[in-house]
Image (cartoon, rainbow, N blue to C red):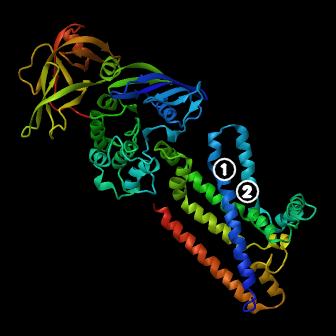
Amino acid sequence: MLVCDISLKRDEFELKMAFEHNGAGVVGLFGPSGCGKTSFLRALAGLEPATKGRIVVAGQTWQDDRAGINLPPWKRRLGLVFQEHRLFPHLNVKNNLLFASKVRRLSKAQYSWPEVLELLDLQTLLERKPGQLSGGESGRVAIGRALLSDPDILLFDEPLSGLDAPRRAAILPYLERLHEQTRIPMLYISHQMSEMLRLTDRMLMLSAGNITADGVTLELAYQLDTNLLSILEVELLHWDQQSCIASVQSGADVLRIWSPQRPTSKHFRVLVDARQVVLATQLLEHSSLLNQLACKVEKVIPGDDGLCLLNLVGQGWKLKSQISLLSLQNFGLIVGDKVYAGVKAVILKGN
Amino acid sequence: MDWFPGAGPLLLTAKLAAITVIGLLIVGTPLAWWLALGVQQNKSRWHGYVRVVVEALVALPLVLPPTVLGFYLLMAMGANGTLGQWWIGLTGEPLAFSFTGLVIASMIYSLPFVVQPLSNAFQSMGRDWMEAAWSLGANRWQTWLRVVVPHCRAGFLTATVLGFAHTLGEFGVVLMVGGNIPDETRVVSIAVYDLVESMSYGAAHKLSLILLGFSFLILILVYGFNRRWSRL
């Protein structure tokens, strides 16, 4: 549970954030660089002395100017995963992980030592120094270190942003696992919509230090006209090892998607790029498409580059499709039309 | 000390250097911290100016001839100087030409050799790791012991050794402020000068060689450790 109403003024820039997080799920803070995301996390953590206002986490007041309360950073129980990870270079991985339990004299934490090692696959890294870790490995250690500090809230400051695509792909599954079994409130900030879609439940959109939109991540992303990504929340029905095809249920429809490994959990999210969704006015008989889903056009967003984006509503799911304006005219598609959305079995993950 | 005429000055020099370094670490550490990291927190322009002035003052002993520094210190510590009068009022003893006076003079003379390596170490460390430690629940003291000191250990070693070694080599300031009183202010550099003046080349050789060997040895140790510690 987080309640905050704070402002932070710095030169020309003013951050003003007021929101509550009831603790269920992950709240994402989304916005371009320079919009104040990192400053906000630093303000929560007590690292920005000029912060004014009120912050209450898990029933404990961290800051309240009227009551004259302002806890120093070390008295605020938060786990902060920095963008640059900030592992202590003079300590090995094990001692980095144990740092908080030593200084806070923790006997028992929400996440136990074996649990964190397993969750993040850290067992083989314990004796190494941070300088001997890859970017992905050091990210995992940073997350584990924060978890083991027994925080009341977990803050992620773009933990994937300094990493290249393969390294990002190496950490994302761990973050997804953490998201699935979340026990503490989490704030995740990023400027990548794909990370928001895969890891967060609620999204606050930030611009120039202010919250401009607040809502369920999938819905907000769907309503955002500039966003090409959408998510299908699916339940695994069956996975066929030979064909590497997973049958999954999304709303009332069953989709078949390619998955070289058995999906690790029953419920997961499939990221769909609007450029991969083909539209047809009737079922295609002779095509390689494995999935053709009946749906309705809810919104047409014409672009000025000869392309247009269509918001589609199916039975219990929503998708976006990007087609050319020429196709739109050829079909004569308008809002309310029934169409079939062709979704390839191979769904690209990531960005 | 009749077995070797240099033993007295050697012991006195070691004592002076050790006390000077301990004092400088106590005074110099907060000063270096403030120079390296104190200003970022308080961004007022006034603070910036003060910092520049303090930085220049700390570096002054590097460029001033020791005799000039010694001359001013003598003026201050003498019976008519402000510091000297205050000291006489406090203890009844004169400060100039005493061991205590020598310690104070040495501390000023060797200040940059302690403050600059520490300041560089703190600056290159930056605030990132301290913030990480705070966010993990370490208070200022725990952060200092568990993060700052181990992280800056090469800086502390360099500061300690350079401060010690530089105090060993001081001559001009001692001559001005301390004079040549056996077991009180007669350090090795003065003793060597004396021996040479009185044509005792043999004894001067012995004493010089000891100082040369010792200085060389500790510098080797410092550079060796620094090499090792820089590969974290």
At which x and y percent is residue A269? 23, 29
At which x and y percent is residue A106? 41, 47
Residue type indicated by callout 1: Leu
Marker disc for residue B35: 1
Lateral position of residue A136 relative to residue A264, left or right: right
Determine crowd level at label 1: few under 14, some 14-19, many 20+ residues with C-alpha closer than 10 A. many
Lateral position of residue B197 relative to residue B214, left or right: right
**Image quadrant where one finds the N terminus of chain A:** top left
Chain letter of mark 1 equals B
Provide the residue designation for mark 2: B58
C-beta proximity under 8 Å, tags 1 and 2? yes
* Residue A35 seen in the current view: no
* Residue that sits furthest to the right in the current view: B80
Point 29% across, 55% down: residue: A124
Point 58% across, 56% down: residue: B121
Determine crowd level at label 2: few under 14, some 14-19, many 20+ residues with C-alpha closer than 10 A. many
Q: Can you tell which quarter of the image residue A190 is in?
A: top left
Front residue of A204/B8: it is: B8
Point 25% across, 25% down: residue: A231
Residue type indicated by callout 2: Val
Chain letter of mark 2 equals B
Question: Considering the numbered disc 2 on the image, is that residue within a helix, a strand or a loop?
Answer: helix
At which x and y percent is residue A180? 27, 33
Front residue of B86/A6: it is: B86
Front residue of A149/A234: it is: A149
Disc on the earlier residue, 1 or 2: 1
Marker disc for residue A279: none
Q: Is residue A136 above or below residue A2?
A: below
Front residue of B185/A133: it is: B185
At which x and y percent is residue B98? 83, 71
